[in-house]
């Protein structure tokens, strides 16, 4: 296990900016394919998977909660969906990487699992709160499949630069 330290004051600000970039790219990809499928960009999750294990678990969960709260207010207009999903995601990452060595392959598997869980929980909660009237088959073929494909491509482009930064910040 890595020596845990406190989250620097600038990291939540950077994560917030990355969350905004995620939202803009999600809207861009939605407009490119004329909303036939919805591909959600999850660079924030990838960065959180790589960097948050460096920091104390409590700090990481609190940061995830506040980012989720901001996401809920900004994108959804209802509190609870992402403010629940992100802390659960962060806790899951700590559990996974306490048991498994951190390699690009395990990060990829964790990333795919996290994207699947977050998208599924988000979809289910939006259906329960009647924010959307979605069909499960469309969710699988029109949202989850394209989202996982997009995020695997995102992973391929960003994992090695992120790991290089991670190794520097670990020292």
Image: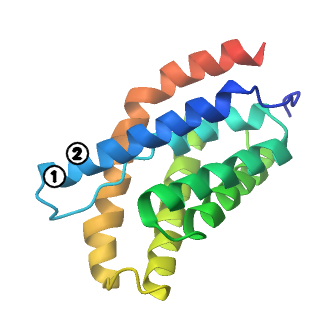
For the N terminus, the quadrant is top right
Compared with 8, 44 (above or below) is: below
- Provide residue 15's location: percent of width, then percent of height: 57, 36
**Nearer to the camera, 152 or 101:** 152
Compared with 34, 99 (above or below) is: above
The residue that appears at 43% across and 37% down in the rendered structure is: 155
For the C terminus, the quadrant is top right
The residue that appears at 69% across and 57% down in the rendered structure is: 87
- Provide residue 122's location: percent of width, then percent of height: 49, 70
Compared with 45, 79 (above or below) is: below
**Nearer to the camera, 66 or 127:** 66
The residue that appears at 16% across and 62% down in the rendered structure is: 35
Q: Is residue 103 visible?
A: no
Q: Is residue 53 visible?
A: yes
- Neighbours of disc 1 within 10 Å: few (<14), some (14-19), many (20+): few
CB contact under 8 Å: marks 2 and 1: yes
**Nearer to the camera, 122 or 136:** 122
Compared with 107, 7 (above or below) is: above
Q: Secondary structure at mark 2?
A: helix
- Provide residue 147's location: percent of width, then percent of height: 34, 55
- Residue beneath disc 1: 31
- Residue beneath disc 2: 28
Left or right: residue 91 compared with residue 109: right
Q: Secondary structure at mark 1?
A: helix
The residue that appears at 61% across and 70% down in the rendered structure is: 80
Q: CA distance from mark 2 to mark 1?
A: 5 Å
Residue 11 placement: quadrant = top right
């Amino acid at each position: 296990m890595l020596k845990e330290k406190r989250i620097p004051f600038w990291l939540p600000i950077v994560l917030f900016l990355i969350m905004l970039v995620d939202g803009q790219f999600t809207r861009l990809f939605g407009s490119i394919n004329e909303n036939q499928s919805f591909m959600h960009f999850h660079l924030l999750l990838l960065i959180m998977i790589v960097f948050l294990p460096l920091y104390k678990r409590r700090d990481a969960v609190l940061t995830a909660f506040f980012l989720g709260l901001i996401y809920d207010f900004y994108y959804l207009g209802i509190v609870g969906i992402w403010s629940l999903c992100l802390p659960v995601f962060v806790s899951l990452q700590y559990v996974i990487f306490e048991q498994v060595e951190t390699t690009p392959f395990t990060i990829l598997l964790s990333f795919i699992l996290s994207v699947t869980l977050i998208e599924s929980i988000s979809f289910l909660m939006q259906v329960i709160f009647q924010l959307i009237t979605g069909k499960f088959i469309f969710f699988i073929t029109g949202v989850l499949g394209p989202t996982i494909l997009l995020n695997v491509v995102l992973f391929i482009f960003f994992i090695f630069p992120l790991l290089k930064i991670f190794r520097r910040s670990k020292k």
